[in-house]
Amino acid sequence: MISRVLSAELAEFAGRRVTIAGWVHRRRQLKSVSFLIVRDRAGLAQAVFHDTALPGEESVVEVTGTVTASEQAPGGVELTEAQVRVLTEPVQAPPFDLYRPSIPAALPTVLDHAPAALRHPALRAPLEISAASVAGFRGTLDRLGFTEIHTPKIVASATESGANVFGIGYFGRPAYLAQSPQFYKQAMVGVFERVYEVGPVFRAEPHDTVRHLAQYTSLDAELGFVRDHRDVMAVLREALAGMLDSVRDRAPAAVATLGARLPDVPQEIPAIHFTEAQRMTGEDEPDLSPAQERWLSEWALAEHGSEFLYVTGYPMAKRPFYTHPDPDRPGYSNGFDLLFRGLELVTGGQRLHRHQDYLDALAARGEDTGPYEGYLQAFAYGMPPHGGFAIGLERWTARLTGAANIRQVTAFPRDLHRLTP
Amino acid sequence: MISRVLSAELAEFAGRRVTIAGWVHRRRQLKSVSFLIVRDRAGLAQAVFHDTALPGEESVVEVTGTVTASEQAPGGVELTEAQVRVLTEPVQAPPFDLYRPSIPAALPTVLDHAPAALRHPALRAPLEISAASVAGFRGTLDRLGFTEIHTPKIVASATESGANVFGIGYFGRPAYLAQSPQFYKQAMVGVFERVYEVGPVFRAEPHDTVRHLAQYTSLDAELGFVRDHRDVMAVLREALAGMLDSVRDRAPAAVATLGARLPDVPQEIPAIHFTEAQRMTGEDEPDLSPAQERWLSEWALAEHGSEFLYVTGYPMAKRPFYTHPDPDRPGYSNGFDLLFRGLELVTGGQRLHRHQDYLDALAARGEDTGPYEGYLQAFAYGMPPHGGFAIGLERWTARLTGAANIRQVTAFPRDLHRLTP
């Protein structure tokens, strides 16, 4: 490995001669003195030169110098008596200056030039927060006895919601990209009781919105031997708390770069029933509108001091066929949504677990059981009461960082119009 | 949550009355006494009954009883004075007995009934080893300063190898399923220097072999600021050692169930150059045959006591266009394979990092740069010397557990003939 010190470690080497490596983040050539700001994976470091021709921005360099205290430099130290060696010269400049506090370009331009744009500290920060979140999700569920699974992304039928699926040519047969690991994670509850998967899901979303992508990363969990949806909500609470702890622990610099404010997760997240939410907001539609979601989030913050709010008991008519009904309240379900800062972030609930209940649910919707054969198998062989949830990673990161558009927190987004880079 | 003790914890509750929950793994009804073996996520537990009608296999049950020492029972204790409550009755029996030491059915039957078959302790064990391996992979790379990424699985062109890609209908345009995250992980070296991804990759593999799947899980890593491929090999060594440590730590029961023998990873994995491998095996083809791979693995074990062997310096003609040549040896590359127990397990190497080298490499292969535009961007803006590798998770697990067919260690395999369940 190239022998080097990371920018964030420089202060530990005060007075010593060391080599750093990275990209030229900024070159400033003054009359008698010149500076390079070098960017590496840990941050920025400044080096001071005299009478040297310096390489331009985005050149890949090694810089050797003496670590010297400096109040103006990032981290309080800089490299003096510095020498630079160029490893790679760029052949063109990015269409925007990466050293400015924000990129002065429209989002499509930024996305078109993602390999360069993501080098900007403020654009890569959401991806660091995203990585830390996923590590916290896995760590929490590992601790709770969950097993990680990997399930098929190519499926035989467009069963889960019917619409918005991508078709594939599969060795001369039709097939589809999986919209979620729902059926497989349920089947795996029969094997491991508690499972999770972090993976891509695909939606042929025909609308061009700030909240939808054709591919996103879903954090899925499913667990057996629950009393009802409340046990699922308790695990989701732990997962969210673990994700935030991990962000605080692993990505403090990214949080600081973005000035992101991380929420507290109450020991018990407040919950209200769907009918109560409707009563409070004076509506009677079978679903919540975006305005209602915002109102309810504000109410939860004012009333309970919580940025998270569970809405439970959604009407069966608005939930997928595998949703478990509320045994005490006909027409309503054991399904829930989690609102976070005014938006739905997570959908979950208890699922049906008896084979006959699946047959009845499909019959009630006028659906043939044929396409569900592989799925129904798991229930024919005996399944415990179970439930689960799915967190959209990009939606989570966007809410956490205050990004207005989900594409701002996705490395290479895919949507109705975008298939490259 | 249903209040219960896990099977593996029973011995800690000796003399106390507790409840366990799980599936009836086996029911044995004798003249005056009957037994249930209950299977939960932690293992098996036995309960003893007198004069009770007991539920059949795969019933989901809660069993309450007094924890009593018993030499015959799994774990050295059993539940006596037991009472059983059925949570869910199965509506049909699996087509094979899950309580036998192995499933007496052909692989296609097993795969057709995966939701039931994977409940068998010997069939679920490889998936536990797989999950533990991935946790070790991530943990090791996290420790080494890598960042986890999630990259597009839907891509605009079939560029990486040209053949064996699945086509998708993407909002009326053609698109393809990604064969690997190669291009994206390289681009992200420009952002985070060191990245990894664990995710599905797709190969429209038209051959029906024991080693190929249409979808598998790839453990990808890529790192910048390397001297050459040897730095990549050193990181791969750490990843493998971390994976095995994690298997020992997290999945000892699964290892014991399968009688799997875990290899030691030498501090330095032995390496031989491709030309030397050819000389020793008396061949001169531009690639290694399966027989050569087996011979070389045996040689490494006899000569170096290692079940792992690096073969370095593969001919450029047999490696992808982005492979970095060996600067000292025209025609040979800085690409390597890792052989493990007679088979190629990992492919990796140093990549080109200069923009002009990519243009030259594509021109030499007579390829237009158009489809590579998004990829080439990263290099235009300055990239450090870098390299990486990809481990096929199912191939790894199969080798580790001695499975003859990769489908035996894949929950729901996809291949030329199989698209369900």
Image (cartoon, coloured by chain):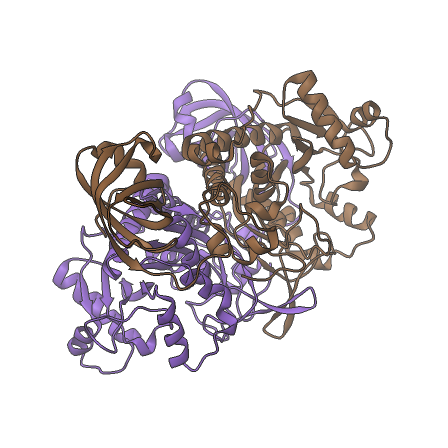
Chain colours: A purple, B brown
Q: With respect to residue B242, does A182 lie above or below? A: below
Q: Is residue B17 left or right of residue B158?
A: left
Residue B261, visible in the rendered structure? yes
Q: Nearer the viewer, residue B415 or B31?
A: B31
Residue in the image at 69% along x and 31% along y: B342
Residue displayed at 43% across by 32% down: B252
In the displayed structure image, the side of residue A296 where residue B71 appears, left or right: right
Q: Quadrant of the C terminus of chain A?
A: bottom right
- Residue B274 picture quarter: top right
The x and y percentages for residue A215 are 50, 62
Residue at left 42%, top 34%?
B253
Q: Position of residue A388 (x, y in %)?
A: 34, 58
Is residue B326 visible in this depiction of the protein? no
Which residue is farthest left? A303
Is A129 located above or below residue A23 in the figure?
Answer: below
Vertical comparison of B343 with A278: above or below = above
What residue is shown at x 28% (from left), y 55% (from top)? B53
Q: Position of residue B293 (x, y in %)?
A: 74, 32
